Image (cartoon, helix red, strand yellow):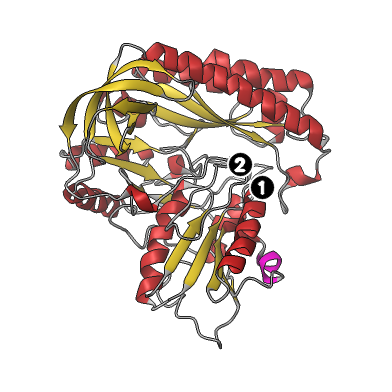
Amino acid sequence: MSKLDIVTFGCRLNSYESEVIRKTAAEDGLDNAIIFNTCAVTAEAVRQARQAIRRARKENPQAKLIVTGCAAQTDPDAFAQMGEVDFIIGNADKQKKGAYALTPDSARIVVNDVFSVKETAGHLIDGLKDRARAFVEVQNGCDHRCTFCIIPYGRGNSRSAAAGDVIAQTQKLVAEGYNEVVLTGVDLTSWGADLPGTPQLGHLVARILKLVPDLKRLRLSSIDAAEIDDTLLGVLRDEERLAPYLHLSLQHGDDLILKRMKRRHLRADALKLVETVRKARPDIALGADLIAGFPTESEEAFANTLSLIDEAGLAFVHAFPYSPRPQTPAAKMPQLPRPVIKDRAARLRAHAEIALHRHLNAQIGRTVSCVVEKPGFARAADFTEVVFQGDATVGGLADIRITGHDGKHAVALLSSPVAQRTGEVDFASVRLQKTEGAIPAMTVSSTVFPPSPVNGGGRNAMRP
C-alpha cells in the first residue's frame, strides 16, 4: 500500500500549502515518503523539525525523507548535513508539478531564488483535509524588513492573488459545504499593492461578501496594525458575516523597541487602532503577537508590553521569546541573556492567561454561533474556543450557550444547530500538537506545531 505523510510546522499558510504538496506529490507518483514542510521563524521551530526528521528515520528506515518550507529555503545546507534527509526542495519549487517525481538521479537539493517568484495561489484547493473551515491563500511574501524577521528570505517579496480567482475559489468552497472561509497570507493587509489599480484588502473582503451571498462567515488571519484600510473598517462595522475577531501583529508595547524592530507603528498607534475597531464593532475580540526579550529590551520596556495587553483589552495573546535568526539585523544587536528572555517570556504568557480568563469570564451567559471543529469542540465567531456537551455536525454552525470556562476554553451547552457541512470530515487522522517540543507520530497525515511571530502577522499557526 502506498504511503505519503506530510508533517507541517508553523503557520496556517504552510498548512494550506501542505495540501497542495500532498496533491502534487501524489500526482507525481511519490510513494513511501514523508515530507516535512518546515518553519524558519524561530530557532525552536527549526529544532523541532530536525528532531522530527531524526525520529522519522528511526521509525521509517526505508522511507524517502523530503524537507521543504521556509527553513529549507533559508538554510538548505543545515538539512543537507543531516544524513537522514534524502531531498531538499525550496519554497519556490515545493508546489510545482514534477517536483516530487524523484529518482536516484534527481538533484538532492533544489533551492532556487524565491525573490524571483511572481505567482501566488497558483494552486487553489478545495479546503484543507480534515478541517472544519476552509482557507484561501490571497497573498504571499513580504516587502517589509522588520529587524527580527527571516520570513522575507523564505517567502520572497509580496505578491497578491487576483480578486476574481479568490472569489471563484470561495464560491467553490461554499458549494463544497464550508460555512467558514479564512483569508490567509504572509502579510495579508498588503494584498493588492502589486495588482492593477492597487486595491486594498477591504475591497476584496467587500467583494467576496457581496458576490458569495451563501457564505456564512468570512474570517481574516493575522493583519498588520499599520495597514488596516477604511473600507475594511466599514465592512467590519456593517457586515455581520465578517467574523468579529482581529489578530494584530503588534510584537511589542514599547516605542523604542518598536523602532529597533523597524515596525511601522508605535504604541499610541496600536491603542488608537483598537479604539477605532471597537467603535466600529463593539462585539469584537482582539488578539496579538508579542515578543519578550528583544535585544536591548529593558525591564521598563518589557513592562510596557505587559501593560499593553491590559490597555488594549486583548483576549488572545501569542507570547514568544525572542529568537535570533540568521541574516536578520536584530541578530547583530546586543543580546539579552537567555535566562532573562526565558523569564520574561514566562511572565508574558502568565499575563496572557489572565487576559484570556478576563475574556472568558465575559462570555458566561452568552449564546454564540460557533463552527464545530470536532465532536465536543467548537470555535465562536470571536475566536473563543468552546467545549460543549451535545451532538452537532462537524463543520456545521451551531448556537451554543456558554455556562462557564475551564481557564482555557468556554464551557457550554449545545442550544441548536444552525447549518451543517454537506461533506463528511474525519478528525481521527489529525492531531494538533500543542505541547512545546512535541514530536509528531509519523502515522498522521498532517501535524501543525506551535505558532511563531512574523513581520506582517499572517503566519501564525494556531490562529483562524
Give the left or right position of residue 82, taking residue 152 as reference.
right
State which quadrant residue 228 falls in. top left
- The relative height of residue 90 versus residue 386 in the rendered view (above or below) is below
457 up-or-down from 111: above or below: above
Q: 77 or 158, which is in the foreground?
A: 77
Task: Determine which residue is flagged by label 2.
Answer: 436
Residue 387 visible in image: yes
Q: Amino acid at mark 2?
A: Glu
| Residue 199 drawn above or below residue 364 | below
Q: Measuring 43% from the left and 68% from the top, which residue is drawn there?
A: 4
Residue named by callout 1: 44
For disc 1, the neighbor class at 10 Å (few under 14, some 14 to 19, many from 20) is some
Classified by dominant secondary structure, the portion drawn in magenta counts as helix
Q: Secondary structure at mark 1?
A: helix
Left/right of residue 318 with respect to residue 194 in the rendered view: right
From the image, which quarter does the N terminus lie in?
Answer: bottom left
Secondary structure state at the residue bearing disc 2: loop
- Residue 330 placement (x, y as % from top left): 74, 42
Q: In this view of the protein, which residue sits in the foreground, 388 or 312?
A: 388
Residue 115 sits in which quadrant?
bottom right
Give the mark nearest the N terminus, 1 or 2. Answer: 1
Looking at the rendering, the stretch of residues picked out in magenta corresponds to: 76-80
- Is residue 146 shown left or right of residue 106? right
Residue drawn 44% across the image and 42% down it: 188
Q: Quick check: is 450 in the magenta stretch?
A: no
Q: In what quadrant of the picture does the C terminus appear?
A: top left
Q: Which mark is residue 319?
A: none
Report, in whole angstroms, how far the alpha carbon at label 1 lies from the one at label 2.
Answer: 9 Å
Q: Nearer the viewer, mark 1 or mark 2?
A: 2
Q: Position of residue 27 (x, y in %)?
A: 35, 75
Tell me if label 1 and label 2 are in contact, CB under 8 Å.
Answer: yes
